[in-house]
Image (tube, rainbow, N blue to C red):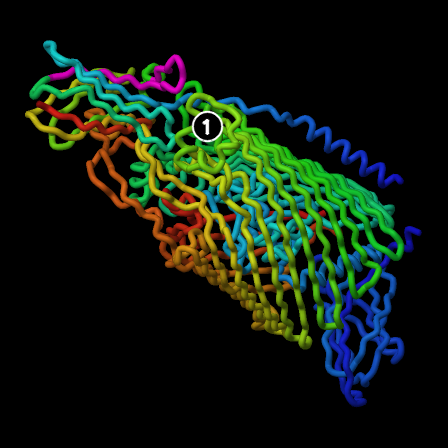
Amino acid sequence: MIQKIFFCAFLCFITVAGYSQQCTYNFKGIITDYHDGSSIFGATIYIKNLNRYTTSDDAGKFEIKNLCNGEIHLLISHISCETKEVFVNIDENIFQEYTLEHHTEELKEVLIASASELKTKTMQSSVLKSDMIDKYSSQNLGDVLKNITGVSAINTGNTIVKPMINGLHSSRVILMTNGVRLQDQEWGIEHAPNIDINTAEKITVIKGANALEYGGDAIGGVIVAEPNRIIVKDSLYGKSIVSGQTNGQGFSLHSSISKSTKEGYYINAKTSFKKYGDFESPNYILTNTGLNSEAFSVQTGLKKFESGFNLYYTYVKNEIGILKSSHIGNIEDLVNAINSDASLIVQDFSYAINSPRQEITHQLVKGDYYKRFEKLGKLTVQYDFQNNRRFEFDIRVGDDRNKPAIDLNLNSHAIKTSFEFDSKSNQTYKVGLVGAYQNNFANPNTGVKRLIPDYSKYDFGLFSIGNFNLNDNTRLNFGIRYDLNYISAKKFYFKSRWKERNYDVDFSDLIIGDFNTQWLVNPKFMYHNFSTSIGFFHRFNSENSFNFNYALAKRSPNPSELFSDGLHHSAARIELGDLRAAQETANRVATGYDFKNQNTNISVALFFNHIRNFIYIEPNGTEQTIRGAFPVWAYKSTTANLFGVDINWQQKITNQVNFNNKTSLIRGVDESNGRNLIDIPAANTQNTVSYTNKKWHHFNANLESNFVFKQNLFPNNNFEVFIPTTNSDLLLDISATPSSYHLLNFNTDATFKLTQKTNVTIGLTVTNILNTNYRSYLNRLRYFADDLGRNYVLQLKFKY
Amino acid sequence: MKLIKNIVILVYISSIFAACSSDEDPVIINEEELITTVRATLIPEGGGTEVILESVDLDGEVGPNEPIIEVSGTFNPNTMYAGTLKILNEAESPAEDITLEIMEEDEDHQFFFSFTNDIATATYGDEDSNGNPVGVQFNLLTGAAGSGGFTIILRHEPDKAAADVNTGDITNAGGSADVQVTFNIAIE
């Protein structure tokens, strides 16, 4: 039985239609590993009816010449794989791609995996593999994702990095980690994803809301981080990565170990530590920007053909210093900061992390179980629990010095089940149900008005997805989803605020308590969201392919957009939510064209996203307090149009030299107000020349030039402020964007075999080689200090 | 059957978690470092009517209402006034005297005084343990008759060693503002 499940399989795309009888056709193909896309060397390709053999070369390619018109009977095999048959119609010169499960895995698993690949081909998706992820071992998820065209990041300093997909971020981007939707207060710009990048072996980014299985509200897209695959054989292996870097004078350490058995049992454990002191801009130290990070995860389970389970636990704790000079007392301090070229507080280098700082702990427990039903499909049931504990410490006086200003405890439970009908190879269906409960508790001991209130949230979702192979070169996929979101919050409003927002007119029935100067209010909101997605993929020939997709997505406003109400100390701004905020409705149309031959691969992706009730936050004047005036940032809604193009061009110059250009352009228009949208990434273009020589210990060297244009299209939110110390009115230029900048980066590595099973990769990376002074529009701390200066990183990676 | 059992167990576990979260009403927060009131009491040397300047913002920093500023009367020309500042949180009852906290951490706090139209000048009347001024006690010397703005600023963690800071010049003081109020005063 067990031997029976050790199959190998592949996916094939077959050509049809026929013309006259000729025997001059060439049949070329490539065999790649399903998991990481690496080419498979030495696979045997046998044409049974012609009794001809060939094998794939070291690039995974094969060629069979002089074939006649008609069907050929193909058998493809590779070491430790059972031979599998394919029938291919030959009526022209064709090029086929075969994705082979390189490692011994069961047949069905691969068929399903193949189906999911079919699905993503109709979407705009990109994959980052473990080699790339390992290079960023010492950094953040947001940093590594910038390698994908169209993905940028919105930062608070350099250690809080949020991924941004086609100009959208936070609640509009779903982050899946090992099948679990991350619930970590993802609404705020200064809330970085609580995920240790080292737990991922493969990261897929799907642009737009076409992956309905994960949620109907991913107006920006979905990031799917998957842990290492399970190899069903007796094995014990591990990996350790040690990095040291000059900027921040810190190190990062990652280690993982995996054990599996041929019966299908497996266990693996991973741990990471990072410690950095103050980072440096080219001219000065960025005081209080250090980072302490620790992460641990363990995973165990059973993977068999008929059934299996997975248990997973992760723990991530980050202690992040926030640039000291970004703490401002009132608007005058902000004016001083904006008008100053340098950071206003520069102290000697230190590893100490003082206030303002964040301390976030995220824990996740997951259990899933699957069972296969013969000739029907696969049932999956999953439960997950997540706890997110978030402290934000502000600079405070007296006894409150060490008391957090924000203390939130978020517990999320989710249960989901799905059934995948995959018995037919040319069409698969998946239906699923999701139920989730979330509770937020804002600790009153902070002594600071809660920015986010206590709330309970219930979600229920229902989806159905279908994937169809219309013919061998055309695929269609569609999905529908319904989500119900219910939120009940209990929140104190100052009576003056309640009146100022005119809530006394519309929401007086929500009041449940009278506390002198404040109302206790119980808003209960329910949202019904319908989402749909359609995707289409067509391959014209071996070189040209095209995809088109459309998604209708709806997103309920998040707690921050609804209820924010308070002075966000670490941002020195009053943030105001809007109880009237309605669901966002996005209609996104996207199309992509891909040209690929032996030397050139060009992908061009276009998108247009029309979002009704697009919720955004922007400066909205000032409010006078006893501390002076404070800038007010209010959530507002508008009709927004986002459109742009992402280009990725890879060119092989010689066998060893490659060139790569990645360019993305995006525009954001506030249609209702006839102006530009705030926080839209500037156009950028990245050019890389790389040299690879496998004979020199897999030597690689890349020189990368990254040019970011000035964002000239931004809304003008400037306002006049009265400065009492000078007795004058000054224009607060809060809108202006930083100048364009150019960064040069260099990376080189080589791999040396230590023993039969052990090797070490030594890598050196230099970022910002020219030590350029720059500020990024999408860094919230751009008002206060320059971005990072030159950095040398030395990395050792051991695989054993 | 086993599967159904598993689902039942999972649902059961999740309902326990859900049950744990109480639906109690949240506790109201009395903001601890909230400053609602700045009161300057100015007593003329050699007797006369004292002048009280007060700025009160009962809905605090977060509330939309602007501080209510009151000036009890006019100043006499060319007169020295002994000034005392009181910083309060009147949202609590009894009101919390934040001046005491400031005095406890006097090295980390300093008041700055400025005037428009040169209507008056101010000097410090107290010192912290390092011999630097704090400003809870101060002296105000009025000029000739006229009117103008009198701004009181409290800086938290100023650099008291920086040039001219100990003479009351805010330019190099740094730190962040805890209080910043402007009173329109008249000298008659």
Query: Which residue is drawn at the image coordinates 40% and 55% (left, top)?
Result: A673
Q: How many marks?
A: 1
In the image, A226 versus A407, the foreground residue is A407
Q: Which residue is mark 1?
A: A449
Chain label for disc 1:
A
Residue A111 in the image: x percent, y percent?
80, 60
| Rendered position, B90 above or below A681 | above
Query: Which residue is drawn at the image coordinates 8% and 24% (left, top)?
Result: B143
Residue A419 in the image: x percent, y percent?
79, 51
Q: Give the prevailing secondary structure in the magenta stretch.
A: strand
Left or right side of A693 for A711:
left
Left or right side of A415 for A46:
right
Q: Residue furthest right?
A: A1
Residue A743 in the image: x percent, y percent?
44, 56
In the image, A645 versus A493, the foreground residue is A493
| Region rendered in magenta | B80-98
Neighbor class of circle 1 (other Cα within 10 Å; few <14, some 14-19, many 20+) is many
| Rendered position, A697 above or below B82 | below
Query: Which residue is drawn at the image coordinates 75% and 70% (left, top)?
Result: A470
A452 magenta-colored: no
| Rendered position, B159 above or below A399 | below
Residue B181 in the image: x percent, y percent?
26, 28
Left or right side of A784 for A58:
right
Query: Which residue is drawn at the image coordinates 74% and 76% (left, top)?
Result: A28
Residue A560 visible in image: yes
Residue type, label 1: Lys
Residue A312 visible in image: no
Q: Secondary structure at mark 1?
A: loop
B95 magenta-colored: yes
* Residue A567 sits in quarter: top left
* Residue A311 sits in quarter: top right
* Residue A151 sits in quarter: bottom right
